[in-house]
Image (spheres, rainbow, N blue to C red):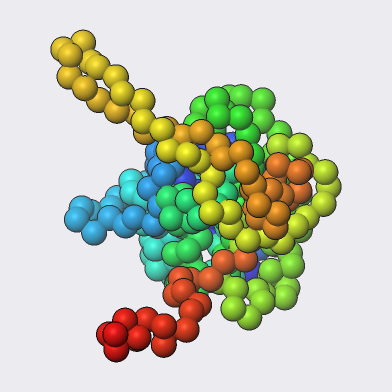
Amino acid sequence: MKILLTNDDGLYSPGLKASYRALSKFGEVYAVTPAVQKSGVGRSISIMEPIRVSEVKIDGIKIYAVDGTPTDAVIIGIHEIIGDIPDLTVSGINLGENLSTEAVTTSGTVGAALEAATQGSKAMAVSLEMRDAFKFESFFAPVDFSNASMVLEKLAKMVLEKGLPEGVDLLNVNVPERWNGRYRFTKLARRLYRTRIDVRFDPRGRKYYWIDGEEEEDAEEGTDLNAIRKGYVSITPLTLDMTSRIDFGELERWFDD
């Protein structure tokens, strides 16, 4: 088995090391990641500048560090480093949860998995819920990846053996900080955050902004957000086809009218 491992947290992420250890028993793992933190870049791709790759070794793990986005790392990993479509692509374990429709369009973790699925690989994005203070600075924080590693190992084994169900291109997996030991298959919540803008001024009096958000209080039953808050591992099957499932006749009547 050939497994491509990537993330959006960079090559020093402890989540990457945890994933590597969990996946190594299934075959050859190729770790190809952005060289630095690339959270929030979604599925962006570098088409206006060259991409350079460096081979490094961290804690005995060979990692290909890509000076680009998670999507760049997947493309380079598949077409240049592996030279073939991997049996499985795993993006994560991400430092912080990736929930709701917002995550599907903004998360570099999910963006990498989407790219892998487009390239023809079975794919999953795996994220671990954690406090905001640790999400981007958890390299030396006391974060326990044991539950997330266990979930990843179990799902990887099933996907490698059985494949993904018809109509499913990838899985978005979120592991709660306090897991109750159970799983739920979920749909995406509409949103995770209520947008907030923090307006500030620099020493010269020029205005600048921090885009932030407060978590939504309501979590509809059956959604990934609801499952995580109740202590379940959330597994959301995703498809690349984002076409709305409506009667096209309704739209065609616009022009008839």
Give how far across and how far down residue 218 sits, in percent. Answer: 62, 43
Q: Identify the residue shown where x is 53% and y is 54%.
A: 190
Could you say which is closer to the camera, residue 173 or residue 202? Answer: 202
Residue 55 lies left or right of residue 189; in this view the side is left
Residue 127 sits above or below residue 4 on the image: above
Q: Which residue is the extreme one toward the top? A: 203
Residue 142 lies left or right of residue 178; in this view the side is left
Quarter the C terminus occupies: bottom left
Quarter the N terminus occupies: bottom right
Q: Identify the residue shown where x is 39% and y is 57%.
A: 43
Q: Identify the residue shown where x is 46% and y is 46%.
A: 8
Residue 135 sits above or below residue 192 on the image: above
Could you say which is closer to the camera, residue 85 or residue 193? Answer: 193
Q: Which residue is the extreme one toward the front? A: 257
Residue 183 lies left or right of residue 138; in this view the side is right
Q: Identify the residue shown where x is 46% and y is 71%.
A: 242
Give how far across and how far down residue 87 sits, in percent. Answer: 59, 70
Give how far across and how far down residue 168 sits, in percent. Answer: 60, 73
Could you say which is closer to the camera, residue 139 or residue 220? Answer: 220
Residue 73 lies left or right of residue 236; in this view the side is left
| Residue 228, image quadrant | top right
Q: Is residue 91 visible?
A: no
All told, the count of numbered labels is 0
Could you say which is closer to the camera, residue 32 or residue 228? Answer: 228
| Residue 255, image quadrant | bottom left
Q: Can residue 141 be seen in this view?
A: yes
Give how far across and how far down residue 94 sits, in percent. Answer: 56, 44
Residue 88 sits above or below residue 38 on the image: below
